[in-house]
Every structure is written in C-alpha cells, then in structure tokens.
Image: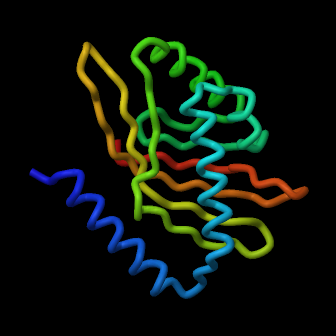
C-alpha cells in the first residue's frame, strides 16, 4: 500500500528534477502560476463564486475525462452544484506538494500541470482523490485567466 508520505516524497523529487532539467524553467513564471493556482483554489475552497469566476476566461473549455466538455456557463453551474451538494459535508482541494510543473507559452501565457487532492465526506466517511490536471493560462490585459482545463485520471 502506498502512503501519502511516499507519494509526497516521490512527487517532491519529481518536481525538483523537473525544475533542474526543464529546458525553459522560469522561476518567476513558476511563482506566478503557483500564486494564481492558490487564488483559484482559495476561492474554490471558500465556495466563493465571485472570485472563482474571475480566474476563468469567458471562452474557457473544461475537459473532464468522465464528464466531457463544458464551457464557461456550464462550468460555473457545475461549481455551484458541487458547492451546494457539499455544503454540509465540505469539499476541499489541495495542490499536491512537489507535483506542479509550469511551462511558458510564447506570446500567450503558460501551461500548468500537476496533481491535486480533493477531500470530501460521503456517507459519513472521508473520501480522498488524487487527480491529474492541466491548465492553460493566458496573460492578457495584465490578468491571468484559465482558458483550458483538462482534468483526468479519475
């Protein structure tokens, strides 16, 4: 059985390796995307739709391996439903330490790749899922916005 400590240690080593071997590693861009990830998911964890909506571009495409493709309005409705369903039991997202990789996209923005952990209570039992994601961030008009989400390995 793999423990959370073993997973974290493996991912930390992977991240250090990625930072040291990435051809185009940019610490400032990495820090910026790490910050934007926290802005997005602090809003998510607080069920703050006002600020969550600000992080997504109006033309966002959200690809979910089990749920299919959604666009902005349906994606926001899905967040609202998720928050309502978990109002009493809670749902929380955490970026798995050491899993984040950030790659620049020339004249556009960045790609964020990582693993996140979602926890919630279901039938009185805490459920934990480690899931993979890819976000495409666009830097436009002095703002970072997510234009594409790929959520997979559910």
Query: How are the colours assigned in the image?
Result: rainbow
Furthest residue toward left? 1
In the picture, measured across the screen, residue 45 lies left or right of residue 71, that is left
Q: Is residue 56 above or below residue 73?
A: below
Q: Quadrant of residue 111?
A: bottom right
The x and y percentages for residue 71 are: 67, 35
The x and y percentages for residue 81 are: 55, 17
Please give the name of the residue rendered at 54% of the width and 43% of the height, measured from the top-left corner. 63
Furthest residue toward right? 141
Q: Nearer the viewer, residue 43 or 81?
A: 43
In the picture, measured across the screen, residue 19 lies left or right of residue 61, that is left
Q: Is residue 102 above or below residue 42?
A: below
The x and y percentages for residue 19 are: 48, 79
Q: Nearer the viewer, residue 128 or 46?
A: 46
Q: Quadrant of residue 24?
A: bottom right
- Circle count: 0
The x and y percentages for residue 135 are: 59, 54
Q: Is residue 65 above or below residue 74?
A: below
Q: Nearer the viewer, residue 68 or 55?
A: 55
Question: Which quarter of the figure is the C terminus placed in?
Answer: top left
Please give the name of the residue rendered at 61% of the width and 69% of the height, measured from the top-left corner. 30
Q: Is residue 44 above or below residue 85?
A: below
Please give the name of the residue rendered at 63% of the width and 35% of the height, measured from the top-left corner. 43
Q: Quadrant of residue 31?
A: bottom right
């Amino acid at each position: 059985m793999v423990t959370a400590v073993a997973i974290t240690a493996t991912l930390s080593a992977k991240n250090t390796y990625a930072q040291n071997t990435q051809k185009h590693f940019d610490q400032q861009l990495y820090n910026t995307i790490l910050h934007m990830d926290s802005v997005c998911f602090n809003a998510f964890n607080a069920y703050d739709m006002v600020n969550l909506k600000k992080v997504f571009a109006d033309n966002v495409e959200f690809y979910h391996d089990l749920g299919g493709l959604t666009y902005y309005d349906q994606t926001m409705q899905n967040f609202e439903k998720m928050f309502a369903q978990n109002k009493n039991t809670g749902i929380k997202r955490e970026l798995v330490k050491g899993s984040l990789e950030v790659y620049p996209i020339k004249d556009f923005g960045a790609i964020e790749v990582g693993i996140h952990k979602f926890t919630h209570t279901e039938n009185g039992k805490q459920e934990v899922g480690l899931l993979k994601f890819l976000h495409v961030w666009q830097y436009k008009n002095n703002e970072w916005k997510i234009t594409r989400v790929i959520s997979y390995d559910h």
